[in-house]
Image (tube, grey):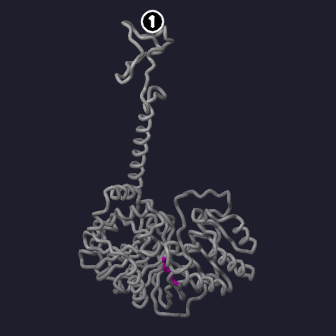
Amino acid sequence: MQTARDRQLGGARLYPLSPMFSLPGKTSGSHRASEARPTAPPGKRKVLRGTTHDERVRFWVLFTAGAVFILGGFFWFTSARILGETFELDYGPESPVFAQSMGPLLGAEFVGGNTVKTLINGDAFFPEMLKAISEAKKTITLETYIWAPGRVSDRFVAALKERARAGVRVHVLVDGMGTLKLKDEMKDDLTAAGVEFLKYGREHWYVVKPNINHRTHRKLLVIDGKVGFTGGMCIDDHWEGNANSPKVWRETVVRVEGPAVRQMQAVFAGNWMRTTSRLLVGPDYFPRADVLLGSSLLQCVKSGPNDSPENVRVLNMLAIAGARHSIKIENAYFVPDDLAVEMLLAAVRRGVEVEVIVPAINDSRFGRAASRSRWGKLLAAGAKFYQFQPSMLHCKSIIVDGIFVSVGSANFDNRSFAINDEVNLNVLDRAVAAEHERIFAADRKRSEPLTLEQYESRPRWQKWIDRFCGMFRSQL
């Protein structure tokens, strides 16, 4: 009920004042409204509706922290979940049953008659890729995540334009997020020369991509359907050189000839169809594969939420479950989820030597912290970790028992396992595996070992940051 005093003040109500405030003077009755204005100390000035500046800051800090933790929980619950239980295999990659099972499960059979050439760093693989482009007679298909302006880009633009003008059909598919630095002039230059240069999922500028979190992270180059390249490379000056400095990234790429290239071409054709609604068919893209060039058994595996979901996750878990002697992982973003950690721990318990090389220099501090949050149990169980020192390590490979190798675009994290489109080449060949083990050993020599004691003695603030970043590992 409104009192006479309320009516006198136009409906305003006077609230009790905090003891911290002082008034100019006191009377035996009620204070006048003008006398009720408090004098606040510095930093406690009254703002809207009786809320102090400090109170507002505390509110927004708590609100932001709560939102972050809610998002972290949401991301954790929406991480890769199709394969949810650990499993065991009674056979390893040496057994024919391994390939016979992996083929149907991953949608691509192992095929023989292939040659594999392993190329280390940009000084080796960029000249090979550009040479293959210059020798193309009928078709070039190129899919990549990052394409940034620079010296490497200029060389690829010149090579692709020259072939397109010579009558070769050139199809380029890039990711919108990975090409933010590209200018329209470069695309127009390629298009004017006859190159079809498109962003994945968007043939025209007005097309809206339904899921902006879904990206093509694949790296593929196929020439005439006969020669294929894949690995972690992108068209960017970061890959130029020989990983001799922090500015030049360490990378592994494989060059393939043989029937498996047809599988690589099919992976590209799938995303090309999703973007353009057009098929790439015929002998210019899929030539006959009756000429056997080598002895390597190969399998090209595609993975992505729209087709073959979690395929690269399944292939890594199958490789780990099949290991009998050794697992060697070299990965730029090693952020294993709970299932992967349990599978690796089970391998250690059955006597498998597990070694992991991760970058000491990382282009993502957030991702580095999230990765570090996942190493503790593995280190405690006896897995060996090494931190590559000279430059950013961008490799994505796993070697099992000296016979099975998987190389490609997929990182050992949830984004590659469940969110992005990826491609990996699986190899069953002791000679190829031995070469990759030599490369692994060379990288290990250029790395610093990380012990459990060193890991546990890192500063408390770093542990808290690692745990915080680890909450978002489903998006990394």
Q: How many marks?
A: 1
Q: Residue at x 34, y 84 (%)?
A: 401
81 on left or right of 157: left
Tell me the crowding category of disc 1: few under 14, some 14 to 19, or many 20 or more residues within 10 angstroms, Cα based: few
> Does residue 269 appear anywhere in the picture?
no
Depth check: give the residue in front, 461 or 386: 461
The location of residue 97, given as percent across then percent down, is 35, 83
Q: Residue at x 67, y 85 (%)?
A: 134
Residue 287 among those drawn in magenta:
no
Depth check: give the residue in front, 104 or 472: 472
- Give the image quarter of residue 387: bottom left
Depth check: give the residue in front, 286 or 169: 169
93 on left or right of 453: right
Quadrant in the picture for the N terminus: top left
Q: Residue at x 40, y 60 (%)?
A: 473
Depth check: give the residue in front, 308 or 300: 300
User: Disc 1 marks which residue?
Assistant: 4
352 on left or right of 372: left
What secondary structure is the stretch in magenta mostly built from? strand
For mark 1, give the secondary structure. Answer: helix
Residue 252 among those drawn in magenta:
yes
Amino acid, disc 1:
Ala
The location of residue 100, given as percent across then percent down, is 39, 82
> Does residue 361 appear anywhere in the picture?
yes
Q: Residue at x 43, y 68 (%)?
A: 333
The location of residue 338, given as percent across then percent down, is 33, 63
The location of residue 262, given as percent across then percent down, is 56, 82
The boundaries of the magenta stretch are 250-254
165 on left or right of 229: right
- Give the image quarter of residue 312: bottom left
